[in-house]
Amino acid sequence: MRLAQSTVVASLNPADQRDLVESVREVIRSSPLVRPRTPNGLPMRVRVTSAGRLGWVGDGVYRYTDRDSRGKPWPEMPDSWREIAERASGPYPWDSAIVNWYDPDASLGWHSDQSEVDRTLPIVTISLGDSCSWAVRLDEDSPISRTRLETGDVTLLAGPTRMALHTVERIIPAPLFSPLGGTRGRISITIRVAGVPGMDQPSSK
């Protein structure tokens, strides 16, 4: 099996996808999407919010905080998101879910997830809406592996793939099965353990 395809561990049914979209909208109403900035000051091509005890911010520095860009606590992570993550990888103290909104022309550059306190713990991502080209490589010297992620696909980065480089190369129109109705674009919900229970985290205030 190709590396990228091996990260796809489940596919959610249409009813569950529609429920997830509604829960994402609730999170966005509590903490609106913002466009992060890279360390060199450039705006990213995705818009982002979070749910859970900790959320991810990019304001020139990539980090997790317990407050959003307005200085307010992040909304609670919906139980259904935790349940999907646990089905994909087992029970962990999930404390952060990053929501990315991809416009039809958006992409996400090559990176590995390194801002977490414990980088051995798994990362689970749910895809909703348009499809995308998903590429993975174990390191910069490894060959690139690609697959197409469809709406409802659940991916897992764990074990040998936990620190793999990965990218969303482009969004692929797939309106027929999209739970977003007539709206083009893609939502990803990435669930992880950003810190550890009881530890202090820097605040964005």
Image (spheres, rainbow, N blue to C red):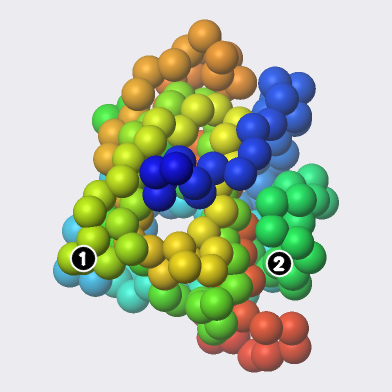
Q: The N terminus is located in which quarter? A: top left
Amino acid on which the number 1 mark rests in the picture: Glu
**Observer-nearest residue: 184 or 203?**
184
Q: Which quadrant holds residue 38?
A: bottom left
Q: Residue at x 69, y 58 (%)?
A: 89
**x and y percentages locating residue 70 in the rendered image:** 53, 63
Q: Is residue 20 left or right of residue 164?
A: right
In the drawing, does residue 116 fall left or right of residue 143?
A: right
Q: Residue at x 55, y 77 (%)?
A: 120
Residue 4's x, y, as percent?
A: 41, 46
Residue displayed at 52% across by 59% down? 157
Residue at 29% of width from left, 71% of height from top?
60
Q: Residues within 10 Å of mark 1 (few under 14, many from 20)?
A: few
SS of the residue under disc 2: loop
Q: Secondary structure at mark 1?
A: loop
- The residue carrying mark 2 is 94
Q: Dot 2 surroundings within 10 Å: few (below 14), some, or many (20 or more)? A: many
Amino acid on which disc 2 is placed: Trp
Residue where numbered disc 1 is placed = 140
Observer able to see residue 145: yes
Q: Is residue 91 above or below residue 189?
A: below
Quadrant location of residue 127?
A: top right
